[in-house]
């Protein structure tokens, strides 16, 4: 089969690899119908993170089940499925509390940018759709595998709800879908932070009521100006840089909530600054599996269209071009078709 492999910074190739097989009785093998490049894939692509030599890439996927292990009971061959980027058994105490991304026996899913994928812990990781989806729904279902579920978790962690003002730090796919989630959860005002006209337009389409183009301290000042000097009730942080995290904390009012889902690298919090901020911080790897049934339902009923975040679609063979486009911010999110 063909698969996307990262050899080092900037070095992505599509190569022949052995087709995966059942290794554990809890495994499923799916034929990947669509995959994509995630913003977190750019960290190793840029050399900021190290996935090791010849790393199989991709953790966002939808596909048709081809085979299952003897212990799999909920998923069957022929099902069209959406899976979380983290595999979970769905049975441990952590999963029962709704944090499947930190499952006691959980595993990262890697290698989804390929024609076939082995999904471990299939019963706790995959969710079948009501039937075979129309082609127009596939991009939206794909977002549920990570970026939609992550944006949704960020909004939930930030305690977004009716009557609240929400600020969103980050205009990538997760931030944009955090805007969508905030709207669905009833936010009264949604302040999207972006300097990119195309991303501003998409944020507005997803429900943003105001756009802030400033960054850092200037962005914080602008949010406070828009909120009577108090700051937002809820802030979504979807970048993971030092500036973004500080911006999120400072844009939040005392007693407010920050939902952070940006994959942080070398982020350090000032203890005294955090102490006097008086905000709630909650986040981390999103427990996408918790939200999958509801997100699939909303997409299936065409109540939401998160697939709009894909502004570049390429065949799997052109995965290197997809990485380059996202790295250079020429695309919000690139969809790959095996």
Image: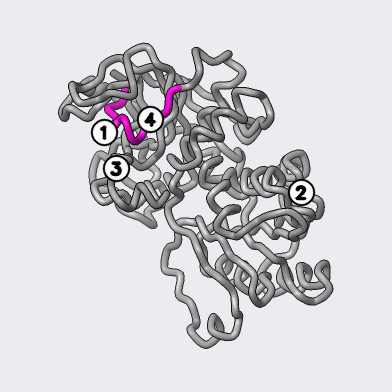
On residue 91, the disc is 3
Q: Disc 4 on helix, strand or loop?
A: strand
User: Where 261 falls versus 116 (above or below)?
Assistant: below
Q: Position of residue 104 (x, y in %)?
A: 26, 51
Mark 4 or mark 2, which has the lower sequence index? 4
Q: Separation of disc 4 and disc 1 at Cα?
A: 9 Å
The span picked out in magenta is 116-128
Disc number placed over residue 208 in the picture, else none: 2
Q: Residue at x 69, y 43 (%)?
A: 184
Look at the numbered disc 3 and give the secondary structure of its residue: loop
Residue at the image point whose x is 55% and y is 57% from the top:
157
Q: Is residue 135 above or below residue 108?
A: above
Where in the figure is residue 12, as x and y percent of width and height? 37, 36
Instruction: Check disc 4: other Cα within 10 Å, few if <14, some if 14-19, many if 20+.
Output: many
State the SS at label 1: loop
Check the picture and name the quadrant holding the C terminus: top left
Q: Which mark is residue 126?
A: 4
Q: Quadrant of the N terminus?
A: top left
Q: Which numbered disc, 4 or 3, marks the residue that appears first in the sequence?
A: 3
- Of badges 4 and 3, the one in the foreground is 3
Q: Earlier in the sequence, mark 3 or mark 1?
A: 3
Q: Real-space Cα distance between discs 3 and 1?
A: 14 Å
Can you tell which mark lies on residue 120? 1
Ranked by sequence position, the earlier of labels 4 and 1 is 1
Figure check: 177 above or below 296: below
Whole-number angstrom distance, CA of label 4 to CA of label 2: 31 Å
Residue 337 picture location, percent across and down? 47, 21
Q: Nearer the viewer, residue 256 or 61?
A: 256
């Amino acid at each position: 089969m063909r698969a996307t492999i990262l050899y080092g910074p900037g070095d992505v190739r599509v190569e022949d690899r052995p087709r995966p097989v059942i290794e554990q009785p809890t495994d499923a093998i799916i034929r990947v119908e669509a995959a994509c490049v995630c913003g977190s894939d750019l960290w190793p692509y840029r050399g900021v993170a190290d996935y090791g030599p010849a790393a199989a890439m991709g953790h966002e996927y939808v596909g048709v089940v081809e085979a299952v292990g003897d212990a799999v009971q909920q998923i069957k061959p022929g099902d069209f499925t959406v899976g979380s980027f983290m595999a979970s058994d769905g049975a441990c105490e952590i999963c029962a509390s709704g944090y499947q991304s930190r499952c006691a026996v959980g595993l990262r899913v890697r290698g989804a940018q390929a024609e076939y994928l082995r999904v471990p812990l299939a019963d706790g990781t995959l969710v079948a759709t009501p039937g075979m989806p129309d082609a127009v729904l596939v991009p939206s279902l794909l977002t549920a595998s990570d970026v939609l579920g992550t944006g949704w978790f960020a909004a939930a962690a930030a305690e977004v709800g009716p009557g609240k003002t929400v600020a969103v730090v980050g205009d990538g796919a997760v931030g944009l879908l955090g805007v969508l989630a905030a709207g669905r959860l009833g936010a009264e005002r949604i302040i999207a932070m972006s300097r990119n006209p195309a991303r501003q337009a998409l944020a507005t389409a997803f429900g943003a009521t105001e756009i802030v183009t400033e960054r850092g301290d200037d962005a914080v000042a602008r949010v406070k100006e828009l909120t009577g000097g108090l700051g937002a009730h809820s802030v979504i942080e979807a970048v993971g840089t030092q500036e973004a995290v500080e911006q999120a904390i400072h844009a939040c009012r005392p007693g407010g909530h920050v939902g952070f889902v940006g994959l942080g690298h070398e982020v350090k919090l000032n203890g005294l600054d955090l102490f006097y901020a008086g905000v709630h911080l909650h986040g981390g790897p999103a427990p996408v599996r918790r939200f999958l049934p509801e997100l699939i339902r909303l997409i299936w009923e065409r109540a939401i269209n998160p697939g709009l975040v894909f502004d570049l679609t390429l065949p799997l063979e052109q995965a290197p071009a997809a990485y380059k486009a996202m790295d250079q911010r020429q695309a919000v999110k690139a969809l790959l078709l095996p």
